[in-house]
Amino acid sequence: MRLVIQRVTGARLSIGGEEYSSIGAGLMVLVGVENGDTQSDASWLAAKTAGLRIFADEAGVMNLDVKATEGDVMAVSQFTLTASTRKGNRPSYIRAAGGDTAAPLYEFYCTELEKLTGKSVARGVFGADMQIELTNDGPVTIIIDSKLKE
């Protein structure tokens, strides 16, 4: 699984021009699920997300996690994170897990993250055409890949 995590001052997700979910300050997480990913990958990534110390403490040092700041989290499934661009200019998504695997792992990741943060995780709709507006704070953007955990 691969995540792109952005520290945001807020984010809003729309489907068909209508707001579906939104958050205040916190984390906007894009979630890519690849063939072979497991609940172990999702659990590890949820713990990394919850514990990521990228928020400023009273001294202005990035030393706090999202729970310490009582921040919000939005997680959106995004199969394009699995793209391979090695050959040619058209990305290949052959590594992307199908919906029957990816959707439950995405939901499992969100549920684990809720347990760790004690707050609901705002979501998109798996497979939907979504528009996301966000303000990246910093900017701070972190990429985490469960294949690189060892």
Image: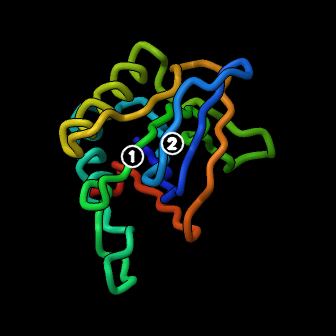
| Outermost top residue | 100
Along the viewing direction, whichever of 40 and 58 lies nearer the viewer: 58
Residue 111: quarter of image: top left
Amino acid carrying mark 1 in the image:
Asp
For disc 1, the neighbor class at 10 Å (few under 14, some 14 to 19, many from 20) is: many
* Residue 71, x across and y down, in percent: 36, 52
Along the viewing direction, whichever of 98 and 126 lies nearer the viewer: 126
Count the marks.
2
Q: Is residue 117 above or below residue 7?
A: above
* Residue 82, x across and y down, in percent: 55, 40
Amino acid carrying mark 2 in the image:
Leu
* Residue 15, x across and y down, in percent: 66, 21
For disc 1, the marked residue is: 72
Asked which colour scheme the image uses, the reply is rainbow
Q: Which residue is drawn at 56% across and 32% down?
A: 79
Residue 113: quarter of image: top left
Residue 150: tell me if it is visible: no
Q: Is residue 2 above or below residue 109?
A: below
For disc 2, the marked residue is: 30
Q: Which of marks 2 and 1 is nearer the N terminus?
A: 2
Q: Which one is closest to the eye, mark 2 or mark 1?
A: 1
Residue 52: tell me if it is visible: yes
Secondary structure under tag 1 reads: strand
Give the Cα separation between the discs numbered 2 and 1: 14 Å
90 with respect to 43 (left or right):
right
Q: Which residue is drawn at 72% across and 46% down?
A: 87
